Amino acid sequence: MRLLFVFLIVVIIVAALWTWLTLAWSYADGERAGVLQKFTHRGWLCKTQEGELAQYNMVTGVAPQLWEFSVRDDNTAAQLKKAVGQRVQLHYTEHPGVPTSCFADTRYYVDRVTVVDSSAAVPSAVPGIPSAAPPAPGAAASAAQ
């Protein structure tokens, strides 16, 4: 019985150390830019803050690549809530091997956000979605005179 108790304590300590290690040290870090499409606060028991970034290619007719990320900092989450629908640049760290989804649903943790341009969210190269309002009728004719 005592051996089982010691074994359980060792397993708990190893799990706690592994969790701390995967959260404290990042495997990689980098920057991604695009349009912030979605930011949610979700979960049944463990509430996490998750987002989705649309990375547009400048080639017409190509669908955007969607990148999902997580946020652990409340100040960064507040900035992201305000930036939904805008072009942003996100700094992230990658943490593979976190043993539970109570910390985040993804392995990418965003820790800094910069709004690039709040006036035009979608690049003009995306087919069917204008990036600015079309000119008023007759505006081109009056500008040419």
Image (tube, rainbow, N blue to C red):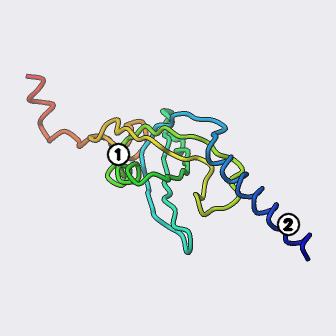
Nearer mark to the viewer, of 1 and 2: 2
Question: Which residue is outermost to the top?
Answer: 145
Q: Which residue is mark 1?
A: 86
Q: Residue at x 35, y 45 (%)?
A: 86
Q: Which residue is mark 2?
A: 6
Spot occupied by residue 8 in the image (x, y as percentages of width and height): 82, 68
Spot occupied by residue 9 in the image (x, y as percentages of width and height): 79, 65
In this rendering, would 95 be left or right of 120? right
Foreground pick, 70 / 6: 6
Quarter of the picture holding the C terminus: top left
Q: What amino acid type should be assigned to the residue bearing mark 1?
A: Gln
Quarter of the picture holding the N terminus: bottom right
Neighbourhood count class around disc 1 (C-alpha, 10 Å): few under 14, some 14–19, many 20 upward: many
Q: Residue at x 73, y 51 (%)?
A: 18
Q: Residue at x 61, y 54 (%)?
A: 106
Note whether 38 is above or below 7 in the view shown.
above
Spot occupied by residue 136 in the image (x, y as percentages of width and height): 15, 41
Q: Secondary structure at mark 1?
A: loop
Q: What amino acid type should be assigned to the residue bearing mark 2?
A: Val
In this rendering, would 83 be left or right of 99? left
In this rendering, would 35 be left or right of 63? left
| Separation of residues labelled 1 and 2 (CA atoms) | 53 Å
Q: Residue at x 72, y 50 (%)?
A: 97
Q: Quadrant of residue 44?
A: bottom right
Foreground pick, 52 / 24: 24
